[in-house]
């Protein structure tokens, strides 16, 4: 059986339907569907996406049989319309449009009025009795065809038209007469010949196949490639070509063209929204040559416009149009974006598709449609992109505000902020304490900067990726962050940075948008987030359907309260080292590190222990009755020590330790690769007094709360465990201190002991670890690093080229590598359950807020995900979608 490359449609019947989007593209499938519904659709046919795929796989040649099928479809189209393609007396004109399976507005090319030439133009003029109209169509065709197919810039045609308007003293295209258009067309054709060395093509068949090739070619143009990359649309999908009988909106004041949405795509209001133009063709509405008019009287009055709306200018057609789009919305059960033309009082529908919409509108539309009974709550949940919640949860820049870009980096943490530039954490704290809003600008951040990051409104780094220290901490704090802004040249000692030929100094005001990774000059107006009833309804539905629990990564009371406010069901990761960088505490930590023996270390730890206990009391109180997972000290000790001569001098004065000893100790603790060095549980085993102090603080805090009638639920997590022996030793230490504190307190306390799985060996030995571990928390940031052997802070140098080359599909630090890292998680989960059937399993890396990673967690049977506080709503929605998709 031969391949079928062409599918026809006309009002009342069609070869295809809406379910054939992969083959016919979105436009072709919906034209077929509208035709089958009996709606007024100009007849035509669709060349399939498979033909485009064949075209690129076979040295840009058409598949065998395509030309014959197109010829047959043209014959049938001629019979349907009663016109002839290329006929001098009664010419059939067609539009040639692209149509991929995923909507790509404005990315690919269109040709209108195809079939016109120096002879058929006379036939069209006689047929319509309007020579000016015919010539208007011809000049449009020459402009569009020359640009799209022949590669002649449209600017040259615009210049010619402007020259004629200036000569005639007019400003509007519709004021040109037939004679005027004749002269314009002569100049257009002369330009084509001058640019290309040959005349504008006259054979309609040559025109048609040239346009088909151009549409296929536009699938690979730069803007289409960029759009596909931005929206994860595969290159091998290809585009369909839709060839359709022309209808004309430029046949006088009873004709029109327009674009409409069945609901407002900006705010979701259930009102018809759009624009139209009398006596115009489709491109006029979007070209900006004439100001479009409102569709409805209500919209016209709200805008204060004096031009009549379509409802007023063409009342009978508008009534038909309103009924038609209501039919489409109910049929597709979603907001429709439609294109239409009115030809001398007769309505024609040219396209319908599910409308693009803002995050705010998507939320309202989904909830409204569910309440109207048009869709189910499950469908409402599936209509919302979880990551779009980032726009709803953080301040945004006013889209109407002007802005000047200084530099661009990675969108590391969403939200927008303005403030004065500072270059050190201490300056950030000092200015913030004085009531200033500051932006911390660093080459890269380290744990030492934590107090400045907390004080700053936002963070910018020149180096680092989406899961660098700056990115991870900023997301946890809800601070906007742009990382990896490599074009910034930062001179901290001079207090300035330069980018794009401009220099900005300490105290200058900048604005950044962490949602798109851009930094701007000066202060820009903000829009604060609003949590509508629709948002709370979606969250309520999400909680009804999800099975994964959603916890938060948090270590401060502010983070914990934020997380709980967003619906977190506990804390899945409290990084205790983040509690050590307060000015008062860091001194004691450094004293502990600089101590010569265990007694010295215990003396310093005794200063820290009451502070840690107070921290744990606050966190456990906020999360009363909910689990709080405490990760004991993880980073290598050298991260707490100063590194620059200035810092070393300052610390020496504060700690009363000689600079020489500080230099020596820093050198002793420095490691070639601290990621693989003396950190995590290795510290807890070699210096057990560190973990003992932390455990004592935790259990004392929990027991005090039990005495107050509260229900603390601490889970103690030992990081970087690789062997059964490490896990057993650390578990025994934990239970010994717990027994001592609980016995002394005279209360009952439930707690769990587990580990963070962040090493491949730990995943492979999970059955043995589970002999003593009661839970596994997958630290997917580090597990990704150790599995790939790449650093999340340095890999930005090659990750983008890898992604562009197709070596990596996505950044593995942003979305979980399910084939590699995911396989280790699956192995560990299965082995852990084999040893301990009730073992609790979750992830606490940054992937805990990524929708694709959350779906993976659901599929492999984890119990929870833990993410940054501001991503909790994202995770709740994504978990519900995972449950619905995999039910």
Image (cartoon, rainbow, N blue to C red):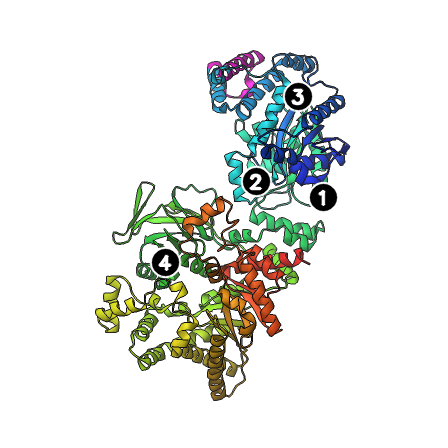
Numbered label attached to residue 330: 1
- Mark 3 Cα within 10 Å, few/some/many (few <14, many 20+)? many
* Circle 1 or circle 4, nearest the eye: 4
Location of residue 858 in the rendering, given as x and y in whole percent from the top left corner: 61, 61
Camera sees residue 626: no
Location of residue 162 in the rendering, given as x and y in whole percent from the top left corner: 48, 19
Point out the tag, 3 or 2, that comes first from the N-terminus: 3
Residue ID for mark 4: 445
Residue ID for mark 3: 93
Q: Is residue 180 magenta?
A: yes
* Circle 3 or circle 1, nearest the eye: 3
Q: Where 375 sits versus 44, above or below?
A: below
Tell me where the magenta segment starts and ends, as one range. 167-192
Point out the tag, 3 or 1, that comes first from the N-terminus: 3
- Mark 1 Cα within 10 Å, few/some/many (few <14, many 20+)? few
Q: Nearer the viewer, residue 22 or 271?
A: 22
Q: Mark 3 and 4 residues: CB-CB less than 8 Å, in contact? A: no
Picture residue at 62% right of the left edge, 72% below the top: 834
* Circle 2 or circle 4, nearest the eye: 2
Numbered label attached to residue 235: 2
Picture residue at 56% right of the left edge, 23% below the top: 145
């Amino acid at each position: 059986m031969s391949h079928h490359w062409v599918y026809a449609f006309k009002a009342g019947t069609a070869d295809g339907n809406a379910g054939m989007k992969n083959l016919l593209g979105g436009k072709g499938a919906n034209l077929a569907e509208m035709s089958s519904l009996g709606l007024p659709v100009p007849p035509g046919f669709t060349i399939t996406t498979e033909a485009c795929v064949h075209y690129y796989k076979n040295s840009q040649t058409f598949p065998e049989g395509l030309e014959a099928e197109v010829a047959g479809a043209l014959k049938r189209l001629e019979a349907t319309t009663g016109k002839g393609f290329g006929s001098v007396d009664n010419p059939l004109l067609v539009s040639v449009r692209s149509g991929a399976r995923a909507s790509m507005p404005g990315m690919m090319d269109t040709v209108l009025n195809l079939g016109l030439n120096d002879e058929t133009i006379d036939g069209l003029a006689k047929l319509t009795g309007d020579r000016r109209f015919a010539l208007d169509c011809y000049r449009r065709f020459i402009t569009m065809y020359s640009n799209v197919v022949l590669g002649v810039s449209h600017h040259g045609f615009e210049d010619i038209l402007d020259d004629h308007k200036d000569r005639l003293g007019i400003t509007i295209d519709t004021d040109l007469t037939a004679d005027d258009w004749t002269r314009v067309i002569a100049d257009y054709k002369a330009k084509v010949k001058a640019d290309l060395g040959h005349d504008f093509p006259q054979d309609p068949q040559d025109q048609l196949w040239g346009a088909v090739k151009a549409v296929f070619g536009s699938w690979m143009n730069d803007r289409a490639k960029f759009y596909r990359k931005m929206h994860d649309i595969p290159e091998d999908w290809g585009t369909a070509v839709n060839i359709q009988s022309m209808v004309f909106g430029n046949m006088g004041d009873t004709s029109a063209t327009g674009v409409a949405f069945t609901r407002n795509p900006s705010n979701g209001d259930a009102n018809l929204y759009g624009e139209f133009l009398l006596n115009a063709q489709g491109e006029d509405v979007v070209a900006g040559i004439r100001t479009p008019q409102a569709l409805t009287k209500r919209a016209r009055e709200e805008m204060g416009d004096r031009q009549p709306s379509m409802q007023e200018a063409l009342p009978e057609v508008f009534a038909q149009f309103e009924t038609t789009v209501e039919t489409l919305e109910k049929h597709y059960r979603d907001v429709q974006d439609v294109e239409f033309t009115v030809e001398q009082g007769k309505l024609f529908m040219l396209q319908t598709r599910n409308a693009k919409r803002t995050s705010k509108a998507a939320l309202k539309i989904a909830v409204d449609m569910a309440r109207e009974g048009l869709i189910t709550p499950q469908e409402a949940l599936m209509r919302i992109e979880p990551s779009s919640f980032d726009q709803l949860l953080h301040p945004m820049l006013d889209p109407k505000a002007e802005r000047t870009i200084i530099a661009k980096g990675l969108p590391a943490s969403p939200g927008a902020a303005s403030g004065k530039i500072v270059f050190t954490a201490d300056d950030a704290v000092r200015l913030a304490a004085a009531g200033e809003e500051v932006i911390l600008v660093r080459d890269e951040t380290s744990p030492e900067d934590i107090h400045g990051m907390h004080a700053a409104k936002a963070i910018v780094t020149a180096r680092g990726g989406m899961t660098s220290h700056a990115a991870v901490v900023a997301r946890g704090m809800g601070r906007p962050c742009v990382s990896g802004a490599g074009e910034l040249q930062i001179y901290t000692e001079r207090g300035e940075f330069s980018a794009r030929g401009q220099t900005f100094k300490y105290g200058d005001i900048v604005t950044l948008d962490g949602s798109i990774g851009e930094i701007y000059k000066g202060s820009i107006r903000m829009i604060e987030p609003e949590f509508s009833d629709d948002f709370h309804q979606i969250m309520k539905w999400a909680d009804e359907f999800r099975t994964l629990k959603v916890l938060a990564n948090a270590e401060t009371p502010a983070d914990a309260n934020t997380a709980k406010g967003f619906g977190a069901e506990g804390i899945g990761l409290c990084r205790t080292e983040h509690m050590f960088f307060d000015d008062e505490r860091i001194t004691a930590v450094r004293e502990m590190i600089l101590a010569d023996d265990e007694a010295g270390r215990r003396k310093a730890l005794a200063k820290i222990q009451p502070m840690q206990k107070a921290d744990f009391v606050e966190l456990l109180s906020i999360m009363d009755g909910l689990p709080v997972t405490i990760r004991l000290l993880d980073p290598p000790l050298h991260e707490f020590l100063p590194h620059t001569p200035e810092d070393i001098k300052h610390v020496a004065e504060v700690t009363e330790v000689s600079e020489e000893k500080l230099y020596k100790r820093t050198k002793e603790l420095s490691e070639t690769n601290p990621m693989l060095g003396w950190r995590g549980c290795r510290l807890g085993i070699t210096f057990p007094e560190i973990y003992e102090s932390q455990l004592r603080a935790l259990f004392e805090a929990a027991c005090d709360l039990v005495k107050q009638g509260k229900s603390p639920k601490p889970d103690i997590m030992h990081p970087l465990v690789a062997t059964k022996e490490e896990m057993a030793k650390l578990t025994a230490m934990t239970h010994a201190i717990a027994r001592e504190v609980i016995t002394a307190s005279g209360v009952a306390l439930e707690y769990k002991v587990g580990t963070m799985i962040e090493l491949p060996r730990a995943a492979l030995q999970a059955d043995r670890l589970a002999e003593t571990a009661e839970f596994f928390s997958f630290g997917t940031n580090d597990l990704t690093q150790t599995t790939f052997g790449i650093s999340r802070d340095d890999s930005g140098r090659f990750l983008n080229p890898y992604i562009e080359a197709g070596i990596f599909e996505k950044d593995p630090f942003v979305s979980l590598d399910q084939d590699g890292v995911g396989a280790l998680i699956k192995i560990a989960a299965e082995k852990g359950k084999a040893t301990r059937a009730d073992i609790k399993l979750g992830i606490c890396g940054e992937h805990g807020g990524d929708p694709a990673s959350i779906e993976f967690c659901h599929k492999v049977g984890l119990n929870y995900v833990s993410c940054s506080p501001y991503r909790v709503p994202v995770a709740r929605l994504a978990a519900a979608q995972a449950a619905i998709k995999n039910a």
